[in-house]
Amino acid sequence: MTVTHPIGLSAPTLADPVIAEAAARFVAARRGATGLAGFPGPLPADLATAYAIQATATASWPDEVAGWKVARVPPALEEALGAIRFIGPVFAGTVVQGGDGPLSFPVIAGGFGAVEAEFAVRIAADAPVDKLDYSPAEAAAFIAAVHAAIEVAGGPLAPVNDLGPTASTAVFGNNTGLIVGEEIVGAVEGADVLRAEVLIDGQSVGVGSAAKLPGGIPAAVAVALGMAARLGRPLKAGQWVSTGALTGVHSIAIGQEARICFTGLAPMTGTAVAAAPAG
């Protein structure tokens, strides 16, 4: 397998065959819906290596990229990793429109699963292929709409949260899917007053708002625009950016129920189910 390194990033610190092997293991585990008890090979020490693994795995995955999830780097690691956020691919077959009925949250048995209340941005226009950095103001021009959303986080790597952001970045950005709910008119300007709450089996596990997103929604979109271009996959009109957890990352096990509530909107509810092997 030929490893293509993301542009505009420092060189990975692991050899290409090691990167290729980790990516292949992640692809096989996700396709087979089988869990991994540990990282397959050396844990990436930097985001450049993690993105190289992610890009290699994404190129091998039999689905189109429909957007990107954005997640925080823990503040204690921001300086060492040189970033406050990372991104991961959201595949077209995993984007679901949240309606009035119950939802399903696929979780790989033996892996990791979580739900997160988020704002999902629909992108208004194709981004330039050669622009690698955006200010929040520049990014705001690419926001066509903001929706209440649920990121179905997780994947095959069971200890991903304990291993940190380089592991999350490498394993498809630790994303399983995106559930897009109602559009929120005026969300960019008034996002800080929009409250989100997540309940697992009827117990509240987190409450928050866009105040937990450094720089707000446009800053998260700016990171997605720039990094997607660096990965050779600039954002296109109609794609999605899930802008980050509003209430935290809430682990969920197969059989548990989750209820995600946004101010003034109908709650979205669903049950975690065992993920099926990919076709």
Image: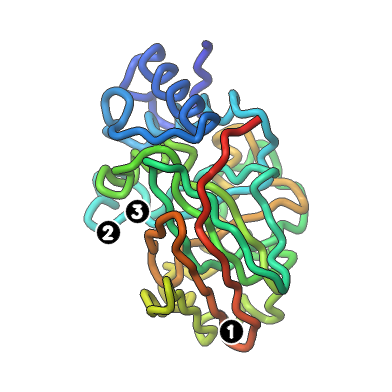
Q: Residue at x 38, y 78 (%)?
A: 203
Q: CA distance from mark 2 to mark 1?
A: 25 Å
Is 38 on the left-hand or right-hand side of 68? left
Q: Where is residue 225 drawn, in percent x and y?
A: 60, 49
Q: CA distance from mark 1 to mark 3?
A: 25 Å
Q: Residues within 10 Å of mark 2 (few under 14, many from 20)?
A: few
Label 3 neighbourhood size at 10 Å, few (<14), some (14-19), many (20+)?
A: some
Amino acid type assigned to the residue bearing label 2 in the image: Pro
Dividing the picture into quadrants, the one containing residue 35 is top left
Q: Earlier in the sequence, mark 1 or mark 3?
A: 3
Q: Are marks 2 and 3 in contact (CB under 8 Å)?
A: yes
Q: Residue at point 50% right, 83% down?
A: 195
Residue at figure coordinates x 47%, y 52% from the top left? 153
Left or right, residue 19 beside residue 56: left
Q: Amino acid at mark 1?
A: Gly
Secondary structure of the residue carrying tag 1 is: helix
- Per the image, label 2 sits on a secondary structure element best described as helix
Residue pointed to by mark 3: 73
Cβ–Cβ under 8 Å for marks 2 and 1 = no
Q: Which residue is mark 1?
A: 190
Along the line of sight, the residue nearer the viewer: 104 or 249: 104
Q: Is residue 63 above or below residue 121?
A: above
Q: Which residue, given by chain and number where applicable, does mark 2 sit on? A: 75
The answer to whether residue 218 is seen in the rendering is: no
